[in-house]
Protein backbone atom coordinates (compact mmCIF):
# COMPACT_ATOMS: atom_id res chain seq x y z
CA UNK A 1 0.00 0.00 0.00
CA UNK A 2 0.81 3.66 -0.06
CA UNK A 3 2.06 5.68 2.88
CA UNK A 4 0.21 8.93 3.60
CA UNK A 5 1.45 11.95 5.50
CA UNK A 6 -1.45 13.55 7.39
CA UNK A 7 -1.10 17.30 6.83
CA UNK A 8 -4.62 18.13 7.98
CA UNK A 9 -6.80 16.00 10.24
CA UNK A 10 -9.94 17.70 8.87
CA UNK A 11 -9.24 16.14 5.44
CA UNK A 12 -10.26 12.69 6.65
CA UNK A 13 -13.05 12.06 4.13
CA UNK A 14 -10.57 11.57 1.32
CA UNK A 15 -8.73 8.95 3.39
CA UNK A 16 -11.88 6.89 3.83
CA UNK A 17 -12.87 7.33 0.18
CA UNK A 18 -9.39 6.36 -1.02
CA UNK A 19 -9.68 3.10 0.93
CA UNK A 20 -13.11 2.45 -0.61
CA UNK A 21 -11.84 3.13 -4.13
CA UNK A 22 -8.79 0.92 -3.69
CA UNK A 23 -10.83 -1.91 -2.15
CA UNK A 24 -13.52 -1.71 -4.83
CA UNK A 25 -11.06 -1.85 -7.69
CA UNK A 26 -8.96 -4.65 -6.18
CA UNK A 27 -11.95 -6.76 -5.15
CA UNK A 28 -14.48 -6.28 -7.95
CA UNK A 29 -12.25 -5.15 -10.84
CA UNK A 30 -14.84 -2.84 -12.43
CA UNK A 31 -14.20 -1.16 -15.78
CA UNK A 32 -15.70 2.10 -14.48
CA UNK A 33 -15.86 3.66 -11.00
CA UNK A 34 -17.88 6.81 -10.32
CA UNK A 35 -17.85 8.26 -6.83
CA UNK A 36 -19.83 11.18 -5.44
CA UNK A 37 -18.92 12.93 -2.21
CA UNK A 38 -19.35 16.20 -0.36
CA UNK A 39 -15.59 16.24 -0.21
CA UNK A 40 -14.41 19.86 -0.11
CA UNK A 41 -15.66 23.31 0.75
CA UNK A 42 -13.17 24.46 -1.89
CA UNK A 43 -15.52 23.12 -4.57
CA UNK A 44 -18.22 25.49 -3.28
CA UNK A 45 -15.75 28.38 -3.60
CA UNK A 46 -14.83 27.32 -7.15
CA UNK A 47 -18.29 26.48 -8.53
CA UNK A 48 -20.93 27.69 -6.08
CA UNK A 49 -24.18 25.90 -5.30
CA UNK A 50 -25.47 25.10 -8.79
CA UNK A 51 -22.67 22.99 -10.27
CA UNK A 52 -20.70 20.01 -8.94
CA UNK A 53 -17.02 19.52 -9.70
CA UNK A 54 -16.11 16.71 -12.10
CA UNK A 55 -12.69 15.09 -11.99
CA UNK A 56 -11.33 11.92 -13.52
CA UNK A 57 -8.83 9.96 -15.54
CA UNK A 58 -10.89 9.29 -18.68
CA UNK A 59 -12.05 12.03 -21.07
CA UNK A 60 -14.80 9.92 -22.64
CA UNK A 61 -16.33 9.10 -19.25
CA UNK A 62 -16.16 12.76 -18.26
CA UNK A 63 -17.85 13.85 -21.50
CA UNK A 64 -20.67 11.36 -20.93
CA UNK A 65 -21.16 12.70 -17.40
CA UNK A 66 -21.08 16.31 -18.63
CA UNK A 67 -23.78 15.46 -21.18
CA UNK A 68 -25.86 13.61 -18.58
CA UNK A 69 -25.52 16.61 -16.28
CA UNK A 70 -26.79 19.05 -18.89
CA UNK A 71 -29.67 16.76 -19.90
CA UNK A 72 -30.74 16.10 -16.30
CA UNK A 73 -30.04 19.64 -15.04
CA UNK A 74 -27.87 17.99 -12.38
CA UNK A 75 -24.90 19.88 -13.74
CA UNK A 76 -21.21 19.13 -13.37
CA UNK A 77 -18.14 20.99 -14.63
CA UNK A 78 -14.85 19.41 -15.65
CA UNK A 79 -11.96 20.56 -13.48
CA UNK A 80 -8.24 20.46 -14.40
CA UNK A 81 -5.77 17.75 -13.43
CA UNK A 82 -2.54 19.49 -14.46
CA UNK A 83 0.88 18.04 -13.64
CA UNK A 84 1.50 20.73 -11.02
CA UNK A 85 -1.42 19.42 -8.99
CA UNK A 86 -0.05 15.89 -9.24
CA UNK A 87 3.30 17.06 -7.90
CA UNK A 88 1.60 18.98 -5.07
CA UNK A 89 0.34 15.73 -3.52
CA UNK A 90 3.71 13.99 -3.30
CA UNK A 91 4.68 13.48 0.33
CA UNK A 92 7.82 14.79 1.97
CA UNK A 93 8.17 11.77 4.26
CA UNK A 94 5.63 9.48 2.57
CA UNK A 95 4.28 8.50 -0.83
CA UNK A 96 1.47 11.05 -0.58
CA UNK A 97 0.14 13.76 1.67
CA UNK A 98 -3.57 14.12 2.33
CA UNK A 99 -3.51 17.87 1.69
CA UNK A 100 -1.20 20.19 -0.19
CA UNK A 101 0.14 23.46 1.19
CA UNK A 102 -0.43 27.05 0.09
CA UNK A 103 1.72 28.03 -2.84
CA UNK A 104 1.92 24.39 -3.98
CA UNK A 105 -1.67 23.66 -4.95
CA UNK A 106 -3.22 24.20 -1.52
CA UNK A 107 -5.46 26.95 -2.82
CA UNK A 108 -7.01 24.48 -5.26
CA UNK A 109 -8.36 22.20 -2.55
CA UNK A 110 -11.04 20.44 -4.58
CA UNK A 111 -8.55 19.66 -7.34
CA UNK A 112 -5.82 18.38 -5.04
CA UNK A 113 -8.36 16.28 -3.10
CA UNK A 114 -9.41 14.61 -6.36
CA UNK A 115 -5.76 14.17 -7.38
CA UNK A 116 -5.20 12.42 -4.04
CA UNK A 117 -8.10 10.05 -4.80
CA UNK A 118 -6.77 9.37 -8.29
CA UNK A 119 -3.62 7.87 -6.79
CA UNK A 120 -5.74 4.93 -5.57
CA UNK A 121 -7.10 3.99 -9.00
CA UNK A 122 -4.94 1.54 -10.94
CA UNK A 123 -6.79 0.56 -14.14
CA UNK A 124 -10.46 1.54 -13.98
CA UNK A 125 -11.94 4.49 -15.80
CA UNK A 126 -12.74 6.76 -12.89
CA UNK A 127 -14.74 9.90 -12.20
CA UNK A 128 -15.15 11.80 -8.95
CA UNK A 129 -18.03 14.24 -8.51
CA UNK A 130 -17.61 16.72 -5.65
CA UNK A 131 -21.17 17.60 -4.60
CA UNK A 132 -20.23 19.79 -1.63
CA UNK A 133 -22.04 22.81 -3.07
CA UNK A 134 -24.99 21.03 -4.66
CA UNK A 135 -26.02 18.51 -2.02
CA UNK A 136 -27.90 20.92 0.25
CA UNK A 137 -29.71 24.22 -0.27
CA UNK A 138 -31.36 26.51 2.25
CA UNK A 139 -34.02 27.99 -0.04
CA UNK A 140 -36.37 26.26 -2.46
CA UNK A 141 -35.56 26.63 -6.15
CA UNK A 142 -37.71 26.09 -9.22
CA UNK A 143 -36.99 22.38 -9.40
CA UNK A 144 -35.59 21.60 -5.94
CA UNK A 145 -37.06 21.58 -2.45
CA UNK A 146 -34.94 23.15 0.24
CA UNK A 147 -32.46 21.07 2.25
CA UNK A 148 -31.14 17.80 0.78
CA UNK A 149 -31.22 17.97 -3.03
CA UNK A 150 -30.42 14.42 -4.09
CA UNK A 151 -27.50 15.85 -6.04
CA UNK A 152 -26.04 13.24 -8.35
CA UNK A 153 -29.11 11.01 -8.54
CA UNK A 154 -30.47 12.52 -11.76
CA UNK A 155 -26.93 12.75 -13.13
CA UNK A 156 -26.28 9.04 -12.65
CA UNK A 157 -29.75 8.02 -13.86
CA UNK A 158 -29.23 9.89 -17.13
CA UNK A 159 -25.69 8.52 -17.43
CA UNK A 160 -26.81 4.91 -16.98
CA UNK A 161 -29.85 5.30 -19.24
CA UNK A 162 -27.72 6.70 -22.07
CA UNK A 163 -24.42 4.82 -21.67
CA UNK A 164 -24.12 2.10 -24.31
Image (spheres, grey):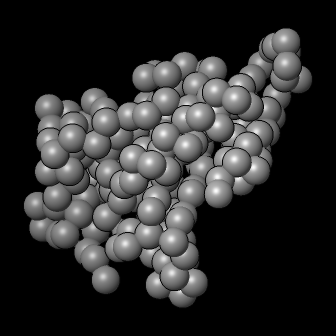
Residue that extends furthest to the bottom in the rendered view of this protein: 27
Residue that extends furthest to the right in the rendered view of this protein: 145
Give the x, y percent position of residue 161.
76, 50
Q: How many marks?
A: 0
Q: Is residue 148 left or right of residue 81?
A: right
Q: Residue at horizontal 57%, vertical 56%?
A: 35
Q: Residue at horizontal 45%, vertical 75%?
A: 22
134 shown above or below 39: above
Q: Residue at horizontal 28%, vertical 53%?
A: 7
Residue that extends furthest to the front in the rendered view of this protein: 164
Give the x, y percent position of residue 91.
16, 61
Where, by quadrant of the figure, is residue 73 drawn? top right
In which quadrant of the rendered image does the N terminus lie?
bottom left
147 shown above or below 91: above
Give the x, y percent position of residue 20.
54, 71
Q: Nearer the viewer, residue 84 or 75?
A: 75
Where, by quadrant of the figure, is residue 133 drawn? top right
Q: Residue at horizontal 43%, vertical 34%?
A: 78
Q: Is residue 142 visible?
A: yes
Give the x, y percent position of residue 14.
46, 57
In which quadrant of the rendered image does the C terminus lie?
bottom right
Q: Is residue 17 left or right of residue 84?
A: right
Q: Is residue 52 visible?
A: no
94 shown above or below 145: below
Residue that extends furthest to the left in the rendered view of this protein: 92
123 shown above or below 8: below
Q: Is residue 74 left or right of residue 31?
A: right
Where, by quadrant of the figure, is residue 122 drawn? bottom left
Q: Is residue 136 left or right of residue 5?
A: right
Amino acid sequence: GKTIEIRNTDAEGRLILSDALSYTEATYKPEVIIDLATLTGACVVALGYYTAGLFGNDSELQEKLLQAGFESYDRVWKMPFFEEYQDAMEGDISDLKNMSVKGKGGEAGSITAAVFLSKFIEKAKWAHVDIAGTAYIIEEQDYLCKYATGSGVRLLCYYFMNDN
